């Protein structure tokens, strides 16, 4: 049985929900940078997709954005 998927909007929030500016990350001083100079701004109307192979830093980037 197919069920319809309906996503309802709760409205727009002002400003940025997440904003990263010039973010770089590595696990330790002896490892290479996982990412460097990342700049991302997300509003309530943004749609964001992170694509990449396992181990390329997608989850780490999300964790870094929550540490502020």
Image (cartoon, rainbow, N blue to C red):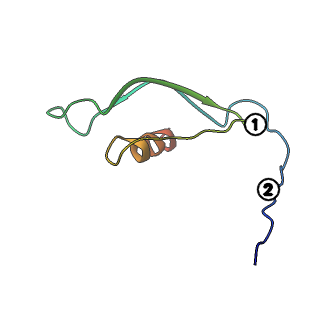
Left or right? Give the position of 19 relative to 52.
Answer: right
- Could you say which disc has been placed on residue 45 in the image? 1
Quarter-wise, where is residue 18 in the image?
top right
Residue at the image point whose x is 37% and y is 41% from the top:
57
Left or right? Give the position of 53 relative to 49.
Answer: left
Residue 62 vertical placement versus 5 (above, below): above
Quarter-wise, where is residue 46 in the image?
top right
Left or right? Give the position of 56 relative to 6.
Answer: left
Question: Which one is closest to the eye, mark 1 or mark 2?
Answer: 2
What is the spatial separation of the Cα atoms under label 1 and label 2, in whole angstroms?
13 Å
Q: Please provide percent x and percent y for residue 64.
A: 44, 40
Residue at the image point whose x is 27% and y is 29% from the top:
33
Q: Please provide percent x and percent y for residue 29.
A: 18, 32
Kindly identify which residue carries mark 2: 7
Identity of the residue furthest to the bottom in this view: 1
Answer few, some or many: residues within 10 Å of disc 1's Cα (few below 14, many 20 plus, some between 14 and 19): few
The mark total stands at: 2
């Amino acid at each position: 049985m197919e069920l319809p998927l309906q996503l309802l909007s709760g409205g727009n929030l002002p400003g940025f929900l997440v904003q990263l500016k010039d973010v770089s990350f590595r696990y330790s001083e002896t490892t290479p940078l996982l990412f460097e100079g990342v700049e991302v701004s997300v509003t309530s109307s943004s749609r964001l997709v992170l694509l990449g192979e396992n181990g390329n830093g997608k989850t780490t980037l999300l964790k870094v954005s929550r540490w502020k």
